[in-house]
Image (cartoon, rainbow, N blue to C red):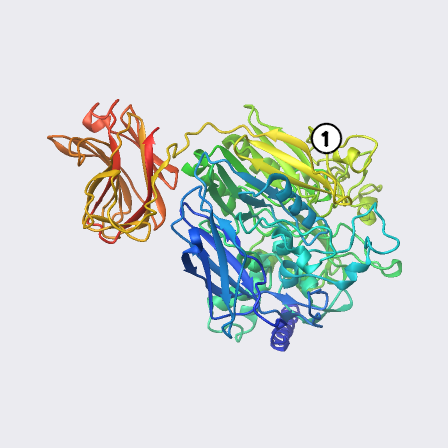
């Protein structure tokens, strides 16, 4: 029976797809950009620029640099999961009655040849299908900052179209100026497949609610308090273009600063069955965007369902097409499609952009995917006369107990991270990486509330433990499972109960003592010197400090009281989280609770970690008028943002009362991260950007300076015959050099830095640090005059790409430290092969390219360390 139901549902799903309207066309009179451009994934010499339009167009490009003289063409893709439905509110157009695709195109171009720590102007231009063009205003971009460069980083999350977010981001810019990066800990919008939540959500009826111009205006509440500002207008300072009467317009942030995000529960919409009609819990349902958004099932279960269909129906994917299989499993579980398509993030981990790590100046950021679905707390819902158990955290629909196709599996994980998972193994590898070890600051982004006073810190981050209670032909019993289970276990242990319709109750638990984060992740963070975890999800501000046995500390901060609050819970303020969940609390406080009360604390941090009181000012007392100081901000009137300043290590939080547009922003809390003791590279200036007329290298260089050896062309240097070329100035016994490899010759073994060179052509002694593109390795060699070249050390399995920065530091003790993109690769010791020849000795720095006529370089720097 179960298999027949699944086949029917699949048929309905495919029919719904066939009936989906062709699209929700844009209603515009001329070309316009749907967003301003924003920055993504900077490297040592590049950064990506992204923007959206509602037309495919003929051409899209960026112009950048001094005088906007450089251009780069954009690649264009049509977004695959941008839709609207009857619940959408779209600026300037009606809402469709059904789930309807909205054609939106994404454009991405790469600005190359950039100088570290130098901002340059840029614009974007789109030409539509009729040849008309639109160009953005001018903004600024830059590549990755070098280590040691001060940065201001905005810590934020949970925009979700919430009321106070335009005020929040506007006050960021007004208070601290332009930021250098944004760390966004998940929940970008509510429903990521609804295009208007990203771009242009607006309802004219919002003007009628608490309008300052209308009678009955309440100054004790924010103006227009039912408005739901869209994501990009809020973070690009353009909200008043949509809603001119609104008191705040947002902040011009993303146009100038790259965003690094983490996946939250709202980045993972559920099963994709648009407009499908079906019966659930005795009611006819139509799958709109909101329903599908909260309708995920675990991927492992979708794999089981696929296998069941495959075995029962020979016409189901008869060719075993792997693309069909993957799409079916994704469409019948959950997806991160919009998150992956909107953002360009590091993708070299085992799950691509799902979780990643990246070094940004002095900061090593680790974005973990520890998100899980949010489901209701209640055990009973519906009218008093027809109460039913819902698909919630702790139960399944009472009418669907024998229909696993409609189970929710509790607060199921979208990605596992326990000690048996790929993510855990990857995390351990990050702690051992040179980039992590060379970073002064180590920060983790993770959406789920693993510490806090908010409602979402309970249940804790334990694997859901499911008890299936059954009566099979008069034989009663129960079976316990911790998901996932294999196909064989499902078929032998669970499917027979389903087929017999024997399941009478499903109970899901989250034991406090089995908190995965607390038991398995937090000890790793302490051990390896992670200083801060930036979490989110509960829409509050609070923080704490956890200290390890050796005195190392991890600061937890949730600074998600951005657009609204879902509440902080401490006795004397709010005594019980989710007070509306009366059926659950009545159960756990009753005489015979089926769930352990100790596992579900009603208030406070579930592990009794003490929240830290704001150090400078108490927003709850001074702005909200409470009768005492509180260690949190829980407010739908006061918005909070946090800035991390890498120059000082300060993490500073600010509050603003949105009811009073002319009031001051107040810094209310500050603490400092203790930097790790690392050696920053480079510690010397850029010597030559080659940003001048084409031709010879110039008077600062000696050696192979003829134009048939090296030639400036287009603000970089093309290698012709090559040879040894040296910076004229000499440096001391501790020196370093670095260069950007604009183009790598795949047939050359010498893309080389010279250090401690003596003589006009370094023939009286020098150290070479060479990238060998043939063998994909970096080789350190030392010249012993009269004896020849000696290989000191080889660093294998290193592949450099165009735009990477090769660096080296030669010290007075004879050691040579090798760097790629400012990250240490290893150390070689010249004394092991040439004795003390390079001990306490200086000389010139320079370059040597050999048989590398297809190579080019740029941005040479170095000097005394």
Residue reaching furthest left?
786
Task: Look at the picture and state if 646 lies above or below 231.
Answer: above
Rendered location of residue 488, percent (x, y): 55, 58
Residue 721 vs 407, above or below: the answer is: above
Q: Quadrant of the C terminus?
A: top left
Q: Is residue 415 left or right of residue 84?
A: left
Q: Which residue is mark 1?
A: 617
Q: Secondary structure at mark 1?
A: loop
Identify which residue, 146 or 547, lies in the foreground. Answer: 146
Report the front residue among 298 and 197: 197
Measuring from the top left, give residue 234's x and y in whole percent.
65, 52
**Circle 1 crowding by C-alpha within 10 Å: few under 14, some 14–19, many from 20:** some
The answer, for residue 82, to whether it is visible in the render is: yes
Occupied quadrant, residue 241: bottom right
Residue 615 occupies which quadrant of the picture?
A: top right
Nearest the eye: 773 or 218: 218
The percent coordinates of residue 532 (x first, y second) are 57, 35
Q: Of residues 816 and 182, which is closer to you in this image?
A: 182
Left or right: where 508 falls relative to 382: left
| Horizontal side of residue 148 vs 291, given as left or right | left
Residue lying at 63% horizontally and 46% vertically, measured from the top left: 157
Measured as percent of width and height from the top left, residue 600 is found at 74, 40
């Amino acid at each position: 029976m179960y298999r027949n139901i699944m086949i029917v549902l699949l048929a309905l799903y495919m029919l719904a797809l066939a009936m989906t309207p062709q699209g929700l066309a844009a209603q515009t009179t001329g070309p316009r950009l749907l967003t301003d451009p924003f920055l993504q994934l900077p490297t040592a010499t590049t950064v990506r620029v992204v923007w959206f339009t509602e037309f495919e167009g003929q051409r899209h490009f960026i112009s950048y640099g001094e005088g906007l003289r450089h251009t780069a063409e954009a690649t264009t893709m049509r977004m695959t999961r941008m839709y609207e439905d009857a619940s959408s509110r779209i600026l300037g157009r009606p809402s469709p009655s059904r789930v309807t695709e909205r054609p939106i195109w994404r454009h991405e171009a790469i600005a190359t040849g950039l100088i570290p720590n130098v901002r340059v102007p840029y614009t974007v231009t789109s030409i539509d299908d009729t040849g008309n063009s639109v160009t953005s205003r001018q903004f600024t971009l830059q590549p990755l900052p070098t280590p040691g460069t001060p940065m201001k980083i905005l810590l934020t999350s949970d925009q979700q179209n919430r009321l106070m977010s335009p005020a929040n981001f506007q006050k960021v810019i007004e208070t601290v100026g332009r930021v250098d990066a944004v760390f966004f800990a998940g929940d970008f919008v509510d429903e990521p497949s609804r295009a208007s939540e990203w771009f242009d959500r607006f309802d004219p009826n919002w003007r009628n609610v608490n309008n300052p111009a209308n009678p009955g205006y309440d100054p004790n509440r924010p103006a227009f308090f039912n408005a739901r500002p869209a994501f990009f207008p809020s973070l690009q300072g353009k909200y008043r273009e949509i809603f001119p009467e609104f008191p705040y317009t947002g902040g011009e942030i993303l146009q100038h600063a790259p965003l690094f995000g983490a996946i939250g529960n709202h980045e993972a919409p559920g099963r994709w069955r648009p407009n499908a009609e079906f019966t659930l819990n005795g009611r006819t349902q139509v799958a709109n965007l909101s329903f599908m958004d909260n309708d995920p099932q675990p991927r492992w279960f979708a794999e089981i369902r696929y296998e069941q269909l495959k075995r029962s129906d020979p016409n189901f994917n008869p060719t075993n097409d792997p693309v069909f299989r993957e799409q079916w499993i994704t469409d019948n579980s959950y997806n991160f499609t919009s998150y992956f398509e909107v953002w360009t993030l590091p993708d070299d981990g085992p799950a691509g952009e799902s979780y990643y790590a990246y070094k940004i100046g002095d900061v090593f950021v680790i974005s973990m995917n520890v998100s899980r679905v949010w489901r209701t707390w209640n055990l009973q819902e519906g009218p008093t006369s027809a109460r039913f158990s819902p698909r919630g955290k702790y139960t399944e629909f009472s009418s669907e107990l024998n229909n696993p196709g409609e189970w929710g599996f509790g607060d199921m994980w979208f990605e596992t991270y326990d000690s048996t998972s790929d993510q855990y193994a990857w995390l351990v590898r990050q702690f051992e990486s040179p980039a992590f070890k060379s970073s002064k600051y180590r920060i983790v982004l993770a959406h789920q509330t693993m510490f806090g006073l908010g409602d979402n810190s309970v249940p804790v981050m334990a694997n859901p433990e499911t008890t299936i209670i059954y009566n099979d032909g008069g034989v009663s019993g129960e079976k316990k499972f911790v998901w996932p289970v294999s196909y064989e276990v499902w078929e032998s242990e669970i499917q027979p109960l389903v087929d017999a319709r024997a399941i009478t109750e499903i109970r899901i638990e989250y034991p406090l003592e089995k908190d995965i984060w607390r038991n398995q992740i937090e000890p790793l963070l302490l051990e390896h010197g992670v200083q801060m975890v930036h979490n989110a999800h509960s829409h509050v501000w609070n923080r704490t400090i956890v200290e390890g046995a050796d005195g190392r500390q991890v600061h937890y901060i949730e600074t998600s009281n951005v657009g609204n609050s879902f509440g902080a819970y401490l006795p004397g303020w709010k005594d019980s989280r989710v007070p509306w969940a009366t059926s659950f609390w009545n159960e756990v406080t009753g005489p015979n609770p089926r769930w352990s009360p100790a596992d579900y604390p009603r208030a406070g941090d579930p592990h009794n970690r003490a929240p830290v009181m704001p150090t400078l000012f108490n927003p709850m007392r001074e702005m909200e008028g409470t009768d005492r100081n509180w260690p949190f901000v829980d407010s739908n009137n006061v918005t909070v943002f946090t800035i991390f300043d890498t120059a000082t290590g300060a993490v500073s939080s600010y509050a603003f009362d949105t009811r009073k547009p002319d009031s001051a922003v107040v810094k209310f809390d500050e603490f400092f991260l203790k930097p790790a003791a690392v050696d920053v590279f480079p510690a010397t200036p850029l010597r030559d950007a080659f940003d001048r007329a084409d031709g010879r290298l110039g008077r600062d260089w000696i050696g192979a300076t003829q134009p048939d050896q090296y030639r400036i062309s287009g603000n970089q240097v093309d290698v012709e015959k090559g040879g040894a070329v040296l910076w004229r100035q000499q440096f001391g016994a501790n020196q370093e050099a670095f260069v950007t490899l604009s183009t790598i010759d795949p047939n050359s073994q010498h893309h080389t830095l010279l250090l401690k060179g003596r003589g006009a052509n370094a023939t009286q002694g020098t150290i070479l640090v060479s990238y060998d593109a043939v063998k994909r390795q970096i080789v350190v060699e030392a010249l012993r005059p009269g004896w020849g070249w000696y290989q000191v050390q080889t660093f294998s399995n290193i592949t450099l790409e165009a735009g990477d920065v090769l660096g080296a530091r030669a010290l007075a003790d004879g050691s040579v430290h090798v760097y790629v993109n400012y990250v240490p690769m290893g150390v070689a010791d010249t004394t092991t092969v040439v004795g003390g020849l390079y001990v306490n000795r200086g000389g010139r720095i320079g370059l040597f390219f050999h048989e590398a006529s297809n190579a080019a370089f740029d941005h040479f720097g170095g000097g005394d360390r």
